[in-house]
Amino acid sequence: MELKTIENLAKLARIHINDETLAETAKSITEVLALVGQLQAADTDNIQPMAHPLDAVQRLREDVVTETDQHASFQAIAPATENNLYLVPKVIG
Amino acid sequence: MEWETVIGLEVHVQLATKTKIFSAASTAFGAEANTQACAIDLAMPGTLPVANKQAFHYAVMFGLAIDAEIGKRSVFERKNYFYPDLPKGYQTTQLALPIVGPGHIDIELDGGEQKRVRIHHAHLEEDAGKSLHENFQGMSGIDLNRAGTPLIEVVSEPDMRSSEEAVAFARKLHSIVTSIGICDGAMSQGSMRFDVNISVRPKGQEKLGTRTETKNLNSYRFMEACIAQEVARQIDCLEKGEEIRQETRLYDGDTHKAKPMRSKEEANDYRYFPCPDLLPVVIDDDFIAAARAALPELLDARSARFESDYGLSAYDAGILCTDHPTANFFEATAKSCDDAKLSANWLMGDVSAKLNAEEKKLADSPISPEQLGGLIARIKDNTITTKIAKQVFEFMWAGEGDADAIIESKGLKPTGSGDLEKMVDEIIANNAKQVANYQAADESKRPKMLGFFVGQVMKASKGQANPQQLNQLLKAKLDG
């Protein structure tokens, strides 16, 4: 696994990997990929991918409002709010 | 070089459910920020989604309306990306097994030509919240009321060749989802949002050019402007020998310009995988039958019925079937006066002109279908002329009552037959020379000469004589 790929993956996953741990991480992931390689050797032709480990079907809910406004309790544990809004670091400059 | 434009659309349609797709929080528009975002919508730890039956019902109705295959087994997947208005860090959506499979939508182009646009599929997914970028202590504000609102994303094949076709498709899709009642169609509130995929290629070339995607269009006007700009930009690039970069562009409704948002190289790898919190959804035949039963007559079918049942032209039927309220108004009018052709003419003519002039919708018409039918009935039974009917129509529009009452109170009743005969006699007596000329003239020249007498009587009756009656009377008297 190339270091550049690891850096890109880290960026997409919003994980900080510093230069010291980069090589170590690359090594670990390469080992995991070897395991994946082993799994991929299995013949899966004509086998439908599994969507869920349980052989069950989703129950559907009736379209009725039962949730009540709880924003006060939710916002009490938010780092910052204003005018009912949750505040986050600026996303567009 | 001659270039061909190739357009495909991805349309997000908000479903008119009362609750979110995975929680029982309300979806009503316009509530105070975050008062309709529950623990599930906020992705609080330990919560689990429960899928909304009505969202599937609506999605299946849409599938049936566009003649699509229904995905009897559909699977939700997680589309992973980070943005503050997506609290879970992934959007729950469908990918490999969507609820609606391939279908098609027929659009009408200028000149009456029809074109079939293929639908690749439509899938169910959740909407994100809204980010407000005004300055809140140097931060962005997040309103999660919209988070979890059910959407179907309708993905077309790249079958459109101009902005006109793209807009015609968008309008048709809007008409379908609103007429079957699965979306309120309020574009200004974001109920329908368009992403446009655009590429150009030399005319005659099979291979598609590199495409760009412009997101965030919520009006037909923006869509038209955006396509024109993007096509010009791409052709300009190619003619200068440059390559088109595959990228996502964001349209800004304030500046009317699209800016690159991200290129393919920086594109997110969404790392889709089946959502372990949701089981596959299996739709049975009864569920599909119930959705089919809930479908109203589709506008295309209604238009075809108007042609066969009422003998209307395809053009007229198409206009009257722009939406169900117009078609309903027409049918109610035609029923009350028993004249489909006149009903169609009055609705598309005088009523529509009045509505346009006053920037009103048909729903705001001060005249009911029954009132319009009442007016047409008086034209049909020759009580009034079309000319007089237009005056009556004005009074009716101003709220002065039904046609019969107006004809009576305004003295618009045509000259009675006794009065008319007296007038005809008078005109004949006072124009001996013209009468002599007429009677001496050849049979073939008489109809034209009759016009003189008709004009005189009309003048005397102040335009209220019934022309048919007058013609008969004059001919009888003059031809002897």
Image (cartoon, coloured by chain):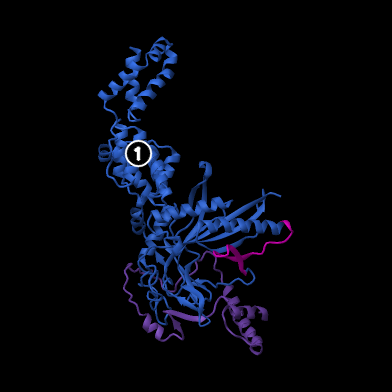
Chain colours: A purple, B blue
Q: Which SS class for mark 1?
A: helix
Residue B340 x, y percent position in the rendering: 35, 37
Residue A24 x, y percent position in the rendering: 64, 87
Whether residue B419 is visible, yes or no, is yes
User: In front here: A59 or B330?
Assistant: B330
Whether residue B159 is visible, yes or no, is no
Q: Is residue B283 left or right of residue B91?
A: left
Residue B354 x, y percent position in the rendering: 40, 46
Q: Is residue B261 magenta?
A: yes
Residue B157's quadrant in the figure?
A: bottom right
Residue B389's quadrant in the figure?
A: top left
Q: Is residue B329 left or right of residue B257?
A: left
Q: Residue at x 54, y 53 (%)?
A: B166
Q: Residue furthest right?
A: B241
Residue B371 x, y percent position in the rendering: 29, 43
Label count reads 1
Quarter in which the C terminus of chain B is drawn: top left
Specify the amino acid type for callout 1: Gln
Residue B223's quadrant in the figure?
A: bottom right
Q: Is residue B336 above or below residue A43?
A: above
User: In front here: B266 or B454?
Assistant: B454
User: In front here: B424 or B133?
Assistant: B424
User: What stretch of residues is rendered in magenta?
Assistant: B239-262
Q: Is residue A79 above or below residue B307?
A: below
Q: Residue furthest front?
A: B430
User: In front here: B454 or B223?
Assistant: B454
Q: Which residue is mark 1?
A: B391
Q: Is residue B75 magenta?
A: no
- Within 10 angstroms of label 1, few (less than 14), some, or many (20 or more) residues? some
